[in-house]
Amino acid sequence: MNFPKESIVEHLKLEVPKDFKHAWLKAEHGSWEPWLLKQNGFLGRQLFWDPKVEEATLLIGWESRAVWKNISQKEINLVQQDFEKIARKETGQTSGNPFPLIFEGELNPE
């Protein structure tokens, strides 16, 4: 990713067991991806999966911190609900989030 200096990268880590890696990707592509593509200031994202610790790392680029943080929590919650619904269907889990968030941070491009 090649982002401008004033941009920011949202950094997330999720617990993703190896048996459900494809379920996680399907949930990402069916919920967050189409929503992100419609967001003002979205620059792109990269998804990584570490098989040793069975964790996913997501790097999401935003034009600025202000643009990113201007997104309402209500809207984020709705997309997260869609993500979890797809994830439960794909994993066979009946409740909760099959891929819990284990880290949330932000990075400044240098």
Image: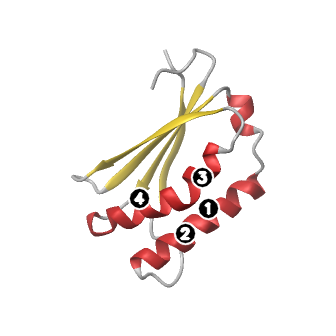
How many callouts does the rendering have? 4
Residue that label 2 marks: 84
* Mark number displayed over residue 80: 1
Image quadrant holding the N terminus, namely top left
- Seen in the image, is 35 located left or right of residue 29? right
| Mark pair 2, 3: CA separation | 15 Å
Residue that label 4 marks: 25
* Mark number displayed over residue 39: none
Q: Position of residue 52 (x, y in %)?
A: 21, 52
Query: Splitting the image into 4 quarters, where does residue 78 fall?
Result: bottom right
Residue that label 3 marks: 34
Q: Sequence order check: which comes first, mark 4 or mark 1?
A: 4
Q: Nearer the viewer, residue 47 or 34?
A: 34
- 108 over 90 or under it: above or below: above
Residue type highlighted by circle 2: Glu
Residue type highlighted by circle 1: Gln
Q: Are marks 2 and 1 in contact (CB under 8 Å)?
A: yes
Element type at marker 3? helix
Point out the frontmost of discs 2 and 3.
Answer: 3
